[in-house]
Amino acid sequence: MKKSRFLTGAVALIIALSAVLTSCGKTGDTTTSPTPTPTAPTSDNANDTGYKYGKIQINGKSGALCGAPVYIAFEKGFFAEAGFDVELISADTETRKIGLNTGDIPVVNGDFQYFPSIENGIGAKVVDGLHVGCIKILVPPGSPIKSVQDLKGKTIAVDEIGGTPDQVTRLWLANNGITALNNAEVTIVAFGSGDAEVLAAQNGEVDAIALWDPYGTLAEKNDGFTVLFDLATEPGFAGRYCCFLYASEKWVNEKPEQVQALVSAFNKAQEWIAANPEEAVNIIIDSKYSSITDKALATELVKSYQFPASHDHAHPLGNVKDDVLYFTQALIDAGLLQTTNAQEFADYVYYNPFA
């Protein structure tokens, strides 16, 4: 499939913004990976610190508990072992999209939220599956809303428009015959953070909230919110990858060996988490990657994400391609993708770095 078949006028605006937004990913708190055993530089990106592939930036400051593979790959030195001097950055969804498109950010964690952007010309490929569901939609104590149908005419808060909770919410609503396109039947508004969403719901500014863990689970456990939707258990979503690992198409085309190395580092992290969930939680909480402080609850959640263990990677990427096709068709049915050929689009989006 030729990329031009999915281009629209929107990509021109996105590319025009890249010079501004790419720099956004380079500001704020950053952390550099542990120093590896020096090796001889063999890449144009390599530097005199001994990293085979040199320095890269990866979004690792989201606060999401299900971002564990990034945190663990960084802390346990899996990125360094793979040849990368990683700087963890904070980058919103639009900055990540542009970073993928330009190659400034080689990989990101995200769900099918990126499919419409790929259709509009952003250069990214799904290269692996990371874990199952970690998104919840909740209503505050005393809310009269008891089901998805009760959300008609209501307002739902998300952290950012176009992010994972936003796209999951829109697809769930569409699956139930409710459109949030152009705020037709449900209004979706951004509040910037999970804490702000919870406060907005408590103050009556919004009717429901869509949140990553740990924010969703903490709102349920600590603040008395009621869960309307759980990505891990909702029919149509349960048992499928919530989040994929995306690689920059520029990297796929120009640096396939490095893409494979990065995916291998993520796989090591997934397998390590599956084998050591309690220790993984200790690292995440002690290093303040996530705001949750209840280690028992965090361990329960990390286990529920079903990070693939080593046997799941015996055949690289497992059922990832099937899930790409599944969500492509779901997005088409919901009117969130314009293409009509799900198989063709899924074949274009998916890339197996081990093939």
Image (cartoon, rainbow, N blue to C red):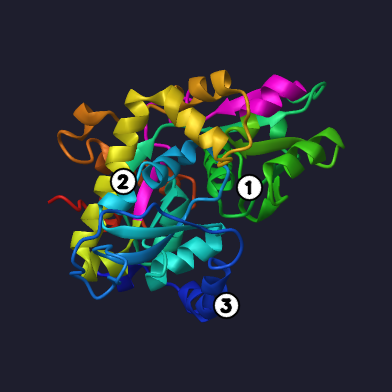
Residue at screen point 30% across, 54% down: 36
The residue under label 3 is which amino acid type?
Answer: Val
**Quarter of image, res 303:** top left
Q: Residue 94, how many percent across, how many down?
A: 54, 63
Highlighted magenta segment, given as a residue range: 217-246
Label 3 sits on residue: 20
Query: What amino acid type should be assigned to the residue bearing mark 2?
Result: Phe
Q: Earlier in the sequence, mark 1 or mark 3?
A: 3
Q: Is residue 127 left or right of residue 329?
A: left
Q: CA distance from mark 3 to mark 2?
A: 31 Å
Mark 1 and mark 3 residues within 8 Å of each other at the beta carbon: no
Q: Quadrant of the image for the N terminus?
A: bottom left
Q: Residue 326, percent across and down? A: 34, 40
The label on residue 78 is 2
Q: In whole angstroms, how far apart are the C-alphas of marks 1 and 2?
A: 41 Å
Residue at x 25%, y 64% (from the top left corner): 252
> Left or right: where does residue 78 sit relative to residue 156?
left
For label 1, the residue is 180
Is 269 situated left or right of 301 in this image? left
What's under tag 1, amino acid-wise? Ala
Binning the other alpha carbons within 10 Å of mark 3 as few (below 14), some (14 to 19) or many (20 upward) gives few
Front-lying residue, 292 or 189: 292
Count residues near mark 1 (Cα–Cα under 10 Å), then give few for <14, some for 14-19, many for 20+: some
Is 346 inside the magenta-drawn segment?
Answer: no
